[in-house]
Image (spheres, rainbow, N blue to C red):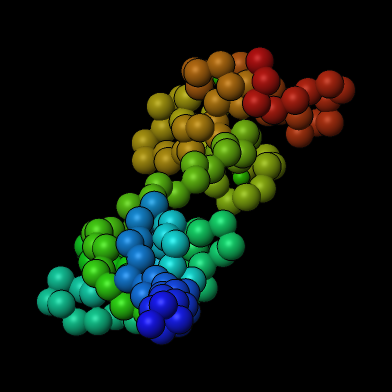
Amino acid sequence: MKKTLLSVLLILCLIFQTAIPVNAKNESVTIDSCVLTTSSAVITGTTNAHAVMVRIKDDSKSIIALQSFAVSASGTFSASLEDISLTDGSAYTISVADYEGGAWTTTTATVGSTPEPTEEPTFGDVNEDNEINAKDVTMLRRYLAGGWNVEINMLNSDVNNDGEINAKDVTILRRYLAGGWGVQLGKS
Ligand SMILES: [Ca+2]
Ligand SMILES: [Ca+2]
């Protein structure tokens, strides 16, 4: 009788040992960030799951993308979806779940919500043609003379970067173009 009980216990133990990994699904998922552009999406997050399913839906609930991604050993994922078509300025519903099943973790993200990196000014390129030459001096002089309909790049035209556009900037730009020794654009 005792032997039977022991074997039953042993069998139960074996069942639980093998059963635990099988039942260890439906892990919860945390979405840490979503960056959407008009052609791509990068979704990062953390989970104990081995893999995740990522779904993107538009505002009419149509599925735009559905793709699985592996989770790293440290429990993070970075899902990068390429060649998708998203509308600039529109909001999308991003859902991520354990690949083996379970509830979706959902968030919304807007295309283009991340600001573009600000461009460094090209000091001296008054007319924004990507060259610094005599034309820029002419444009700057016309602008300072109050020339009608003169459009200049204000950041680039402050040649000595002192916050003002005036005759000093013309002088420095001319010196620079003449190959003046020690003339640096963007420095007063
Ligand atoms: Ca120019
Ligand atoms: Ca200046």
Which residue shows up at 24% across the image and 82% down it? 63
Which residue shows up at 27% across the image and 63% down it? 105
Horizontal side of 23 relative to 117 (left or right) equals left
Q: Position of residue 164 (x, y in %)?
A: 49, 18
Horizontal side of 119 relative to 150 (left or right) equals right
**Can residue 123 be seen by looking at this rendering?**
yes
Q: Nearer the viewer, residue 23 or 101?
A: 23
Which residue shows up at 39% across the image and 52% down it? 32
Q: How many marks?
A: 0
Which residue shows up at 24% across the image and 69% down it? 103
Above-or-below relation of 110 to 166: below
Q: Residue extending furthest right?
A: 181
Horizontal side of 117 relative to 41 (left or right) equals right
Q: Nearer the viewer, residue 102 or 140?
A: 102
> Would you identify the image quadrant in which residue 167 lies?
top right
Above-or-below relation of 33 to 137: below
Q: Position of residue 90 (x, y in %)?
A: 23, 64
Quarter in which the C terminus is drawn: top right
